[in-house]
Image (tube, rainbow, N blue to C red):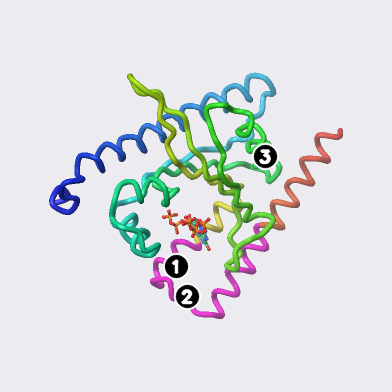
Amino acid sequence: EIEEFFGEQFQQWRERFRYYEMAITELESDLGIIDLDWQTRLGYSPIEHVKTRMKTLPSIVRKMKQKELPLEVDALWDNVHDVAGVRIVTSFRDDIYAILEHLRKRDDLQIDEVKDYIKHPKPSGYRSLHLIVRTKVYLAERIIWVPAEIQIRTLAMDFWAATEHKLQYKYQHQVPESSRAELTEAANMADALDTQMGRIREQILKK
Ligand code: 0O2
């Protein structure tokens, strides 16, 4: 069925999807090592947990249609940056930027774009740091740079986004205006919680 859908390009699509999987494997392993290294050196890691996901085919097709792209592998590769997705969840807001600084120093990662939805939240109240990256993958015969999106957010931001996502889904993205306003307020409360936790950490570190 899928083979028919992609026609002649089927093998190419399959190859690209393998590359995205490799990128996810690579990033997951790198982040696991960063976590261990931080724990070993400092007894504390900014990484609370890491989640990965591949964008589903229906979601990819929807996005390509939305962006008016031809259904071709190269159009996907060049224009859809979040087929391979990695989410890093931290305890504290400052940790997000500590991770960003670390990632900037790596030569196996190219950061093409940083979207700071913490300094500039979405109208919904959504907060997170998004990095559009390309990650280095060693194949047997050559090196490839695979596009991926890394989302970095605190537990509080993640709680809000996951719960809001569930509600949007339940209401088929038609959440009533009054509830939407309350959801934005809840996002601000999650932000206040991050501020307070950060302040408490500073007080404790000073002692
Ligand atoms: P999924 O299933 O999470 O992948 P671009 O990707 O650059 O073409 P866009 O829309 O500017 O387009 O990307 P953006 O806004 O930087 O990132 C979109 C992703 O951020 C979403 O992915 C969500 O994961 C997350 N996000 C953005 N706004 C909200 C929000 O209001 N609520 C929640 N819960 N998440 C949000 P997808 O593609 O929608 O889906």
Which residue bears the numbered disc 3? 95
- Real-space CA distance between mark 1 and mark 2, rounded to the nearest whole angstrom: 6 Å
Vertical placement of residue 89 versus 64, above or below: above
Instruction: Using the image as rendered, state which of residue 166 and residue 131 is in the foreground.
Output: 131
Question: Observer-nearest residue: 46 or 53?
Answer: 53
Q: Position of residue 99 (x, y in %)?
A: 63, 36
User: Residue 21: percent from the left, percent from the top?
Assistant: 35, 36
The residue nearer to you, when weighing 162 against 147, is 147
The amino acid type of the residue labelled 1 equals: Gln
In the rendered structure, find residue 154 and report the number of the disc placed on it: none
- Which residue appears at 55% of the width and 54% of the height? 159
Q: Are marks 1 and 2 in contact (CB under 8 Å)?
A: yes
Instruction: Give the mark nearer the N terminus: 1 vs 2.
Output: 1
Instruction: Check residue 165 for magenta coloring.
Output: yes
Q: Earlier in the sequence, mark 3 or mark 1?
A: 3
Name the residue carrying label 2.
175
Q: Which residues are magenta?
A: 164-190
Identify the residue at horizontal 38%, vertical 45% (top origin): 77
Left/right placement of residue 86 relative to residue 1 reads right
Check residue 168 in the rendering and tell me which mark sits there, or answer none.
1
Quote the CA–CA distance across marks 2 and 3: 32 Å
Displayed quadrant of residue 112? top right
Q: Amino acid at mark 2?
A: Val
Amino acid, disc 3: Asp
Q: Is residue 201 above or below residue 189?
A: above
